[in-house]
Image (cartoon, coloured by chain):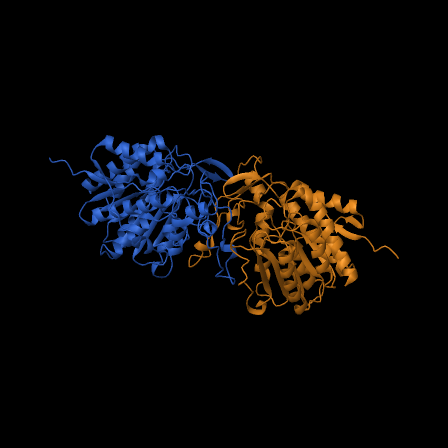
Chain colours: A orange, B blue
Amino acid sequence: MSQPPPVAVYRSNAHLAHAGLVELLAGRQIPCYESPERAVAIERALLGAGGYELREPQAFGLEPILAVHDRTLVDVVEHAWTDALAAGADGSHPLIPDTFKLAAYSGPMEPLALPSAAHLRLGAFCFDTATPMVAGTAAAARAAVDVALSAAHAVVDGAALAYGLCRPPGHHAARAMLGGYCFYNNAAIAAEWLRRDGGFARVAMLDIDYHHGNGTQQLFWERGDVLYCSLHADPARAYPYFSGFASERGAGAGEGLTRNFPLPADTSLDGYADALSEALDAVAAFDPDAPLVVSLGFDTFERDPIGDLALRTADYAEIGRAIGGMGPRTVVLQEGGYAVDAIGANAVAFLGGLREGREAG
Amino acid sequence: MSQPPPVAVYRSNAHLAHAGLVELLAGRQIPCYESPERAVAIERALLGAGGYELREPQAFGLEPILAVHDRTLVDVVEHAWTDALAAGADGSHPLIPDTFKLAAYSGPMEPLALPSAAHLRLGAFCFDTATPMVAGTAAAARAAVDVALSAAHAVVDGAALAYGLCRPPGHHAARAMLGGYCFYNNAAIAAEWLRRDGGFARVAMLDIDYHHGNGTQQLFWERGDVLYCSLHADPARAYPYFSGFASERGAGAGEGLTRNFPLPADTSLDGYADALSEALDAVAAFDPDAPLVVSLGFDTFERDPIGDLALRTADYAEIGRAIGGMGPRTVVLQEGGYAVDAIGANAVAFLGGLREGREAG
């Protein structure tokens, strides 16, 4: 029996300079959960497990980003930090907005003018106080997109599976909105690239991060060619609060192609597997011709500091097997997960299960 | 010569229990500028100056508030604190939202469901991190409305001038939005009450707070019966950033009846008086039959900790004289002003000037 080829793990060191240090939870400064150590821990665990090969991403430039995000958002990500410095900030504190442009204020007055300086308009684009920006943020966000696109490219080129160790994550980034530790929507950009450049007609996205992927949902809400299925903590109790209810199912050509599975607190593998099974049925019914795009979060872990679900490390192997059993080629892209001491083992379990599921399937 | 009758100063002690202690500026905790001491300092200074009579407000109930604000906003103001306690908060920290429902996320998906708990939906209504809520906030906000309505009522009943020492302030509160230290829009509620209950056809509002009154602007944007003129720091550099540009002039029946006068940093009396003169010309041209409603801020003061204009105490007497010279009866309602050591003297100067202007006019 020959060994299966190693799985490509795309990763970049650009993320190391994106370290916000603090975020705000209900008005209190806390250490930023979304830390460089998360990605480093996953890399180390995969190298230790064997069967994985770390690879640098290719550079895809801004075009695939602009296929998904408004230029106004890209301008804010690219210039907020430098505009703040030009306005006199000393660079010792991450950029966190304090004033937001709410939906409750839109209406007959729109469109309203905005300040020209990117850091002063940040609150029109960033929806929370948990997404600190620093000098290295823009480059890290671009590199995370390159990581995602490199993984997608590898699968289009014939690999059965590729893993993009994206950091910062992406699924909370919408067309003209960032937040939730996310700047550019890595998974959505990969899905759109599969449609436009990969030559595929239908892309299915499965989001198993603890949080609803509000950005991904918005981007494909009216699209008939992209299915978005998300398992997440019920927004009635959990971030991001203002989306992810089961009643949200898409519109127009996308009617029924957004599927949300909100989960109660303390959900363990049994309940999780039921929802996952429903989501995978929806994927099968959609009959995608493109590789499956998985937004992978480990904040569903029982000891995650910001989650309240109850998955254990061994459970991720089961979840990986179920997803791998779907058969199609798979692009796995990292989103959240904040229990740094367990995130590596959880990644090894998930990817190992996924490989087993593929081989069995 | 007989002494003029004392000017009625409506005030309530309910505001004392609304003390947020901290707010967040660009992600950093700072002591809350909008403090009970502000109103106490004004009361003391007016009593010391003589010619003023402190009065308790009448209770007007929720009806005049609901004539201006959505029930959803009132529900959040009334229940956010108690819902947070019911969810396990220990009450030791003010309620400050961390996740916001941005205009950038509205669109085809709307209307989206919201969490039922008021504290979890707060970020759909509150647009900043500078508006801490505590146990006493809801009662203080209601009392500030009663203060404003009592002042309006006194003028309708024949007084030439009444002053409502509102705290919390109001002009940043829009139909379904709170923020900027504001919960209910005291001045807008008074203006609407003058229309509905006062029997007047046209109300002019003059806002001389340092900040644009984004809430007041939204509430009367399409109204032909209410003129809103605001002098404020240019939103290109100053809070609330996303409104108050000169290009915003109202729409529909209200076209031309919103007038914004953005001011550069370091504006002193000369530049200020020019803009004020233009605003007063607009008021005269509108020919209101109702008392003039003035939103009064002293954050235009040269030493204000969050402003960058350059008005001095004596300048407020000049500004008061110019407004008093307009002739109509006047309802003055307190908004901002954060130089606590000077705010009393500034109030004495402004109200004294206004009385002189009336007598000369």
Tell me which residue sits at (59%, 60%) in the image.
A261
Tell me which residue sits at (47%, 56%) in the image.
A111
Q: Quadrant of the N terminus of chain B?
A: top left
Residue A161 percent location from the top left of the image: 76, 57
Q: Quadrant of residue B341?
A: top left
Q: From the viewer's side, name the closer residue of B302 and A25.
A: A25
Side (left or right) of A336 relative to B9: right
Q: From the viewer's side, name the closer residue of A228 and B105.
A: A228
Q: From the viewer's side, name the closer residue of A153 and B241.
A: A153
Q: Which residue is farthest front? A: A270
Residue B165 percent location from the top left of the image: 29, 40
Residue B294 percent location from the top left of the image: 29, 45
Q: Quadrant of residue B10?
A: top left
Q: From the viewer's side, name the closer residue of B278 and A164.
A: A164
Side (left or right) of B355 relative to A102: left
Residue A272 percent location from the top left of the image: 63, 57
